[in-house]
Image: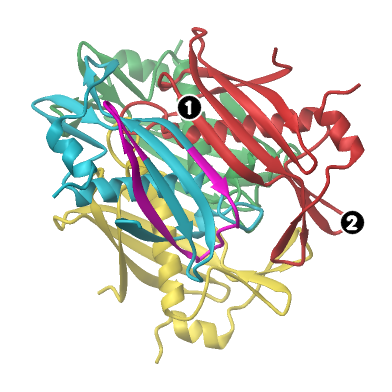
Chain colours: A cyan, B red, C yellow, D green
Amino acid sequence: MSAFSITRRVEFGDTDMAGIMHFSNFFRFMEVAESDFLRSLGLCVSWVENGVKWGFPRVSAACDYAKPAKFQDVLTVAVNVEKVGKKSVSYSFAFSNQHGEALATGRITSVFCRATGSEQIEALEIPPHIRAKLEGQP
Amino acid sequence: MSAFSITRRVEFGDTDMAGIMHFSNFFRFMEVAESDFLRSLGLCVSWVENGVKWGFPRVSAACDYAKPAKFQDVLTVAVNVEKVGKKSVSYSFAFSNQHGEALATGRITSVFCRATGSEQIEALEIPPHIRAKLEGQP
Amino acid sequence: MSAFSITRRVEFGDTDMAGIMHFSNFFRFMEVAESDFLRSLGLCVSWVENGVKWGFPRVSAACDYAKPAKFQDVLTVAVNVEKVGKKSVSYSFAFSNQHGEALATGRITSVFCRATGSEQIEALEIPPHIRAKLEGQP
Amino acid sequence: MSAFSITRRVEFGDTDMAGIMHFSNFFRFMEVAESDFLRSLGLCVSWVENGVKWGFPRVSAACDYAKPAKFQDVLTVAVNVEKVGKKSVSYSFAFSNQHGEALATGRITSVFCRATGSEQIEALEIPPHIRAKLEGQP
């Protein structure tokens, strides 16, 4: 069962000449769901603390498409935390439309990182207080 | 060995606030590589013939990110046909930058379809002359 | 005074490496505001009726930027119908953030059109019942 | 007469359900033309020098659309420097397709800026050596 979901409308600019949402925009919708999920936990995909940039850049993203999403469809994107690893977190995303039809399933794995210098990013162990939130511990 | 590749520059609008190419834009680059590959064979991702719409909508897409792509990087995207199934074709995409560094690896599976009516799409067996081209037969 | 407005959050993917919303995305936000405004009137930016495609393609779009929109800002986009011409409608859009700061002002002019054949579009006079709605007549 | 132009193909992902390039993507094409033009002069839309961020953020952008750009069209975008002001530079952009048809005309005004602190940007007078390049002085 999903602990978190968002809804988002397919806008005209999200479609392509096939008359359906362009396949790349499912990843943008996943990002919105991921961001809103993190925000609901008091976390963020990217932030600055004591002059250091922290965040969760993605190391993998995937989507399987079953049915097209159409202009003006209001999609529900349900987020599940699949795994909290030492340095990474993996989500799955279930897309459905306003008729309850399953449209697509996505996956994103993000790594906890800090930017060191202007050009380097370094993966770090997820601190306990962030891990607890991601794991849904009260 | 890759039979086909494109180069494409990372534009300002392709970046995000992390200072690197947004992860969703790797899928747009893959699409350009797929389209150019099909065009090089005299095929297309979408076309109309005798009033019927034909094309190769995607049923899955994935990307693994190893290193970030930066503003003004000129990326090479090498395309390989991994498998030509009965109704689908699977590609892999290898991203590298102008320094020869491997950045990411992607995969797309597209299904040969025709649009029947304004709302329905139907998967079909890939015809022999298209299959031969995708398989690189002379 | 504005008769209609929407709110929309600046997502991570809307930003660029300058750390602010990419200037082109203001046009996407305007489109959402325009679409929602038309929907609130029972109209649409694009629809099919009796097998004919109707819609309001844009003939001009402009934006003046005063202050940047930042990641996670919740923007209000207020829509005003500036002019309903014989065949076109012009909107203005006022962008502000959650602090009430004015960020940008946009303008779009759309023309009432039908698609004739697969390749041609033809501008038409706006019918009285659509004109009345756009002009806010009860 | 235009001193500089680029060509760029309309990709599948640049189109919308009307079957033509989405109006917002003309601004992305203008940005590519602006960036390439600046690069041809040894300049950039955004760079870091001595730890300070410099660049040319846009203060206004506009486009008038005459004919649609279609999938696979190869657009020529000709850039003209319309005016080099004290702190700003204004460009015009003329879009045409591979048949020589004029499609659209755009305008962008960018301001010479430096980022002071993480949140502030400050407009500055364009230095003489940059002005000379923008004005096409040898």
Residue D36 at x, y percent in the picture: 50, 23
Q: Which secondary structure dominates the residues rendered in magenta?
A: strand
Name which residue type carries label 2.
Answer: Asn
Give the answer, above or below, for where B3 lies relative to D104: above
Residue annotated with mark 2:
B50
Nearest the eye: C59 or A48 = A48
Q: Residue D131: x, y in percent?
A: 35, 20
Residue at the (78%, 44%) spot, across then down: B87
Residue B91's quadrant in the figure?
Answer: top right
Please name the amino acid that badge 1 sits on: Asp
Classify the position of the N terminus of chain D by image quarter: top right
Residue at x 45%, y 48% (from the top left corner) = D62
In the rendered image, residue D63, in percent from the top left (x then y), is placed at 50, 48
- What stretch of residues is rendered in magenta? A62-90
* Disc sitting over residue B64 in the figure: 1
Q: Is residue C78 left or right of residue D69?
A: left
- Seen in the picture, residue B104 relative to C117 is either above or below; the reply is above
Q: Residues within 10 Å of mark 1 (few under 14, many from 20)?
A: many
- Residue B10 position, x and y percent, is 48, 25
Q: Secondary structure at mark 1?
A: strand
* Quarter-of-image position of residue A103: bottom right
Asked whether, in this view, residue C23 is left or right of residue A71, the answer is left
